[in-house]
Amino acid sequence: MDKIASFTVDHTKFGAGLYISRIDGDITTYDMRTRTPNAGDYMDNLTMHSFEHMFATYIRNSDFDIIYFGPMGCQTGFYLLVRNADNSKVLAKIRKTLLDIICHTGEMFGCSAEECGNYRNLSTDAAITEAKKYLEILDNTRSSFKYY
């Protein structure tokens, strides 16, 4: 059986940042790596779940054609799939979405039994902390969108 594309990337050679994981026709998969792989610093479920609710809601309500946004099982980041992506515009939109989360006031999006299968495991503060952390990474890293 063939390896899937994400298993062919040497995870010991790159750190936190923003990468293009793959391009399938007009859909680009971005690897929003919030943690360095295999470094022992992994997102706990509360942080991952909370950030996903906030980021997904804000970015899906933008003018971008978002196919999917969700966490990586390895707890080191998220995948963002965008149709007809322009890398510089996507990076700007990610930054804007992070700022939207950081400035968010009010209730957590999707925080009810009717809207979420684990609604008690959400924290606006956890999402804001993660957004600040990832924005700092993006601000201090010049992305070529390539793993290495």
Image (spheres, helix red, strand yellow):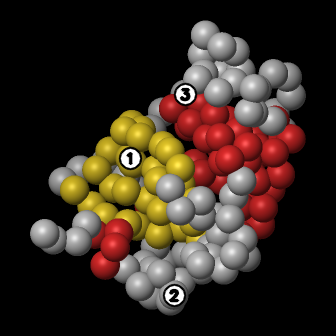
Identify the secondary structure beneath mark 3. loop
Mark 1 falls on what kind of element?
Answer: strand
Q: Residue at x 41, y 40 (%)?
A: 68
Q: Are marks 1 and 3 in contact (CB under 8 Å)?
A: no
- Residue drawn at x 37%, y 56% as measured from the top left: 29
Outermost residue, left side: 1
* Image depth: mark 1 or mark 2 in front: 2
Inter-mark Cα distance, 1 to 2? 26 Å
Residue pointed to by mark 1: 82
- According to the picture, the residue beneath numbered tag 3 turns out to be 61
Residue denoted by label 2: 12
The numbered mark, 1 or 2, whose residue comes first in the sequence reads 2
Residue positioned 58% across, 23% down in the render: 117
Q: Amino acid at mark 1?
A: Val
Please report the residue visible at 44 percent of the width from the left and 59 percent of the height from the top.
30
13 relative position to 82: left or right:
right
Q: Is residue 141 visible?
A: no
Residue 16 seen in this snapshot: yes
The spot of residue 75 in percent (x, y) is 59, 59
Label 1 and label 3: CA atoms lie apart by 13 Å
Quarter residue 83 falls in: top left
Type of the residue with mark 2 = Thr
Kind of residue at disc 3 = Asn
Q: Left or right of 88: which side holds 8?
A: left
Graded by Cα atoms within 10 Å as few (under 14), some (14 to 19) or many (20 or more), the crowding at tag 2 reads few
